[in-house]
Amino acid sequence: QVQLVESGGGLVQAGGSLRLSCAASGRTFSTYAMGWFRQAPGKEREFVGTIRSFGNTYYTNSVKGRFTISRDNAKNTVYLQMNSLKPEDTAVYYCAADLPPTGSYSSRSSYDFWGQGTQVTVSS
């Protein structure tokens, strides 16, 4: 069982930045593929980006160039740096662990463990 705890959400003005953190349990964190998803009110949970165990990153088109995912295996933590935030980025953000890693990194069904979510609100 893997436990994930997100933090760092909050209220920010459009154009601002936030960094989300996701702390994971487990001794083999370096082997986890980690993903970030978000869910806006009335919408389905959608893929934001992922960082694989070797450090490769992939993002949905709407956040490319603005969001960056990184990981610190020594701290069992993955980060989501969000810059140039827009009101449409407002959502609850979730981190998730995909282990063993699968190839369908943008699919919710590929992820086995989820955090509780953290709210990000971007005001215009």
Image (cartoon, rainbow, N blue to C red):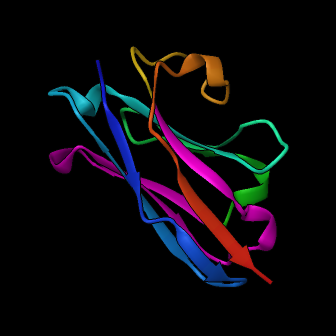
Asked if residue 7 is positioned above or below residue 102 in the image, the reply reads below
Tell me, yes or no, whether the highlighted magenta stretch contains residue 93: yes
Asked if residue 31 is positioned above or below residue 13 in the image, the reply reads above
**What are the residue bounds of the magenta stretch?**
67-96
Residue 2: % across, % down: 30, 25
| The one of 121 and 100 positioned closer to us in this rendering | 121
For the C terminus, which image quadrant? bottom right
Asked if residue 45 is positioned above or below residue 41 in the image, the reply reads above
Q: Please tell me whether the stretch drawn in magenta is mainly helix, strand or loop.
A: strand
Q: Which residue lies furthest to the right in this view?
A: 42
Q: Say whether residue 82 is left or right of residue 72.
A: right
| The one of 63 and 10 positioned closer to us in this rendering | 10
Residue 54: % across, % down: 36, 35
The structure residue drawn at horizontal position 15% and vertical position 47%, both measured from the top left corner, is 74
Tell me, yes or no, whether the highlighted magenta stretch contains residue 110: no
Q: Can residue 12 be seen in this view?
A: yes
Residue 47: % across, % down: 68, 39
Residue 122: % across, % down: 70, 74
Q: Say whether residue 39 is left or right of residue 7.
A: right
The structure residue drawn at horizontal position 79% and vertical position 72%, both measured from the top left corner, is 87
The structure residue drawn at horizontal position 52% and vertical position 22%, both measured from the top left corner, is 111
